[in-house]
Amino acid sequence: MTDNLASGVIQPRTISLQHLSARINLAGVPVVVWLLLIVLLPNLLLVATSFLKTSNGVILLEPSLTNYARIWKSMGFWVLLWRTLSFSFLGCLLATCIAYPLAFYVGRVARRHKTLLTVLVVLPLWISLLMRIFAWRIILGQSGVLNAALVSTGILDAPSGAFLYSPTAVVIVFAYISVPFIFISTMGAFEKIPRDLVEASQDSGASARQTFMHLIWPLTRRNLAIGFSLAFLVTVGDFVTPAMIGGIDGTTLGVVVSTQFGFANNWPYGAAVAVALMLSVGILLGTIIALTPAKGVMLGEEAEDSPPPSADKQHVGQRFGSAGVLAAILYLYAPLAIIVLFSFNSANLQIFPLQGLTLHWYQELLKDQSLLEAAQRSVVVAACVVTLSVTLGTVFALIVYYSKLKGSRFYEMAFALPIATPGVVLGIEMVLGTEIFGIPSGVMRIVIGQMSFVMPVTLLLLLVRLRRLDPSLMEASLDLGANRWQSFVHVLFPMIRGTIVAGAFLGLTLSADDVMVTLFLSGGAPTLPIWVFNQMRFGFTPSVNAIFSLLLFTCLLVVGLAAWRNAVKPAKALT
């Protein structure tokens, strides 16, 4: 009787789950197809193209090592490779000097305003990359804010042209771009260090330096290395910053690769340079990760009731920490404030101080037909990219999580590969992949190219969320007679809805701000970022300041609404 009852209760659930697993394994075919077409094929095409030759702009299907021999013998290539890697490395190193202490203060010291400080540091990631780069052009320019301040204080007799279009300018902007990435990765490690360990070290007679070297640093260095590597990948593939503020001495391999696929029309050589850059980046980042092994495991978060450090001991340190945090926030937001300020400047040139206040440049936006078309195209592209990426990302995440595919971690790494690929290389890969299928330049190419890195973001976010859920909830739903669709709609979806929305907002930001991939795919149909980029390269107008200001206000509005929504939901739950 007991066996019959047991079989009557357990067997249906076992059969249901096995049936579900079998169906999902069969549905895993789209996952493999995506990886083959969007990840594997473009990479293979890039490598294969690097072994071809060109003659009068025509690619010859003749395998050869000519391009790699040219690279090996070219002193200019090695100079540019060193310059590319060193610019990104120095930029990330400078960003580490800012972000690491900032992460320590927010993660270990700040209590009342921790959430606000975190949002303020991370928010620039949501703001247009072009806006941040262009802001530094205004600051470092010969008639910019820095020169005006130095001349007015008597440090310089006349404005200097040494700040802009120099390697120093590239490193400064790379550091500015890198700070949020390193901060995000490192702050979590500081938060999870139990305060008892720090107090035990101090009680044992260790100095502050010894506590840091033997406790804090070993527990945070791996997270720092991850954030450093992510920032390095973003900057090393950035050809927009060197093109806009680097000048001749600031040229990097990213600019060379984009030129070979553009004006020079030498795709095989450009592909070979891209492959060499990827190999160099992989070796460098692999070395960094190997030199920063994780020591110790931290689980959970610091207890809320842990006593704060002694006020007497921390009084001076907190003052210096608060001043440092304030300086870091000003460093992140001063360039953006300058853009907004100049959007109301009546002068045609970016000259400081302002010549007068006007709304003329905002009014000019409504009269520029090419701008309006680019903006409409951006909206269409973003809507398609976000809709398709969220749908496919959700489906693929469910397949990877609930199916018993062998090597599921490998699938995750494969999905993340486009995210870890330098932007200039990913753009080239998407050109090759869409070209072989005869997809013309324009909206369709842009959507496919942007989905290659937007969809994995949604997928990876959902996988993290799914692993934190209790699997027995879905099992109970199936045991009670609900089918798979009903279980998803009424049980699983409400628990992952917030992550899906977050992925959609992040995807919208990535799509609306992308330049490095879209520039290769747009052809004669530019999106708004490409239109702005072309304006800044070939024919600047002050209307660009107005565009950036509107984008900034939109970003702040979206983030504000999201924060308000998160604040209202707990309040409703309490009532």
Image: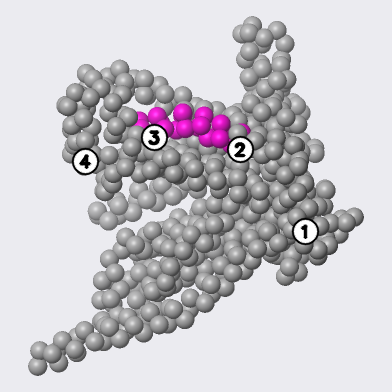
The residue that disc 2 covers is 85
Q: Which of marks 1 and 2 is in front?
A: 1
- First of labels 4, 3 by sequence position: 3
Residue type, numbered disc 4: Glu
> How much space separates mark 4 and mark 2, taking CA atoms?
42 Å
Mark 1 neighbour class, 10 Å CA radius: few under 14, some 14 to 19, many 20 or more: few
Q: Which of marks 1 and 4 is nearer the N terminus?
A: 1
Label 1 vs label 2: CA separation?
27 Å
Residue identified by numbered label 4: 304
- The stretch drawn in magenta includes residue 35: no
Q: Do the residues under discs 1 and 2 have CB atoms within 8 angstroms?
A: no
Q: What whole-number distance in Å separates the C-alpha atoms at marks 2 and 3?
A: 25 Å
Q: Residue at x 54, y 42 (%)?
A: 284
Q: Distance between the residues labelled 1 and 4?
A: 63 Å
Highlighted range, magenta = 87-107
Of the numbered discs 4 and 2, the one sitting upstream in the chain is: 2
**Label 2 vs 3, first from the N-terminus:** 2
Tag 3 residue: 103
Prevailing secondary structure of the magenta residues: helix
Instruction: Give the label, 4 or 2, closer to the camera.
Output: 2
